[in-house]
Image: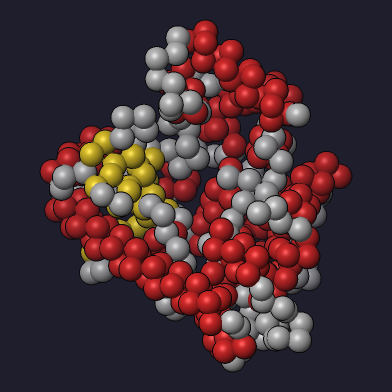
Amino acid sequence: MKNTTEDTLALAAALDPLRATKSLIPIHRPLIEQAKNEGVAGILYKSLSASEDLDSLPQEDKEILRAYYYQTLRVNMRLLHALKQVLARANQEGIRVVILQGMDLLQDLYEDIGLRPLMDIDLWVSKTDYSGLVRIFESLGYERDAIYPDTFKQGATVFDVHTHILWADRIQTRKMILDKSEEHIIREVRAIEIEGEKAFCLSPYDQVLYLSLHAFKHRVNRLIWLVDIKRILERWKDEGWKGLAARAEDLGQSKTLLSILFLLEQVFQLKSPQGALKPLQKKRLCPLEKKILRERVKAGSLPAWGPLFLFSSELGFLNRLRFLFENLFPRPEVLRQVFPRLPNLKTWQLYLKRIAQLIRMVR
């Protein structure tokens, strides 16, 4: 379903029980389907329940929302159990595991694990610990994906393992997105507990920046990624916002922060406290960057080329060329992941197919 500005803003408003009144936000089947696609149907279900508007919906619509909520609950319980098994073994062997994205947020941001859908579990480990974690997965019966070798599956349970926080294990020039090395992020991770087992997660500031980069990588095509960041920021006082701005400047992520805040204001009317972004006062989004971001509200996602433009906006001319070239024409083993249904193509055929794909994207 193609989004419209009105649909996106209506759905965003409906996620807030204080704004989701029958007179202002008409809930209809297309909006419910959009909520499912964007990962916020569970929150919509609870918001409507809290505002007592759920009973005004047709019975079939109520059942769709209720079924989505309980399906999310079941999946997340299964994933939590699987993660506990992996963490128990990792802790026994002294492997430090950093939890990324949804699973950490599920523990910290959401009062109900049925609100935030998860599709897989993302882990970040050092290169030296990687082989040990692989052995743990193999001993627990997980199968390594033939096309995506850092993905491990057991039935419907999927783990995605990273050895670089910004996915430079696939595209090496992504290291340039950060002004500092990964060590500056590793030093700030904090210990948490999941189902009684020790794990680690990113510091609050780094978490916001990472979630923003992850959302942009996927063209922000799911509203739940904006909800995650919004929920974090809503907890903070002025000092938290100032610390975030300073951290963004330190890591070379000023434009990333300005971009995500621009989107949050467009979609959720969330504004930073006055003066909180003083460290970034010399940085501005250009008209093209704002146009790219507005496409999320108008069409449901950024343009296909949008993430590359946003990621490379502060790299300088030569580094930007290197970044764009490798992302557009990565090494053959990465291209085989782009075209998984054509495993027997020769290298030159892969690149011809990639050129044709890029031409279609531009059109």
On-image quarter of the C terminus: top right
- Residue 198 percent location from the top left of the image: 26, 62
When asked about the image quadrant of residue 346, the answer is top left
Left or right position of 100 against 362: left
- The residue positioned 41% from the left and 62% from the top of the image is 104
Left or right position of 289 against 205: right
Residue nearest the viewer, comparing 41 with 288: 41
Colour style of the rendered protein structure: secondary structure
Residue 84 lies, with reference to residue 172, above or below; the image says below
- The residue positioned 51% from the left and 57% from the top of the image is 207
- The residue positioned 53% from the left and 82% from the top of the image is 59
When asked about the image quadrant of residue 224, the answer is bottom right
Left or right position of 108 against 56: left
- Residue 238 percent location from the top left of the image: 67, 73
| Residue 209 seen in the current view | no
| Residue 145 seen in the current view | yes
Residue farthest to the bottom?
52
Residue 22 lies, with reference to residue 85, above or below; the image says below
Residue nearest the viewer, comparing 201 with 242: 201
- Residue 125 percent location from the top left of the image: 33, 43
- Residue 211 percent location from the top left of the image: 54, 54
Residue nearest the viewer, comparing 203 with 171: 171
Q: How many marks?
A: 0
On-image quarter of the N terminus: bottom right
- The residue positioned 54% from the left and 69% from the top of the image is 41
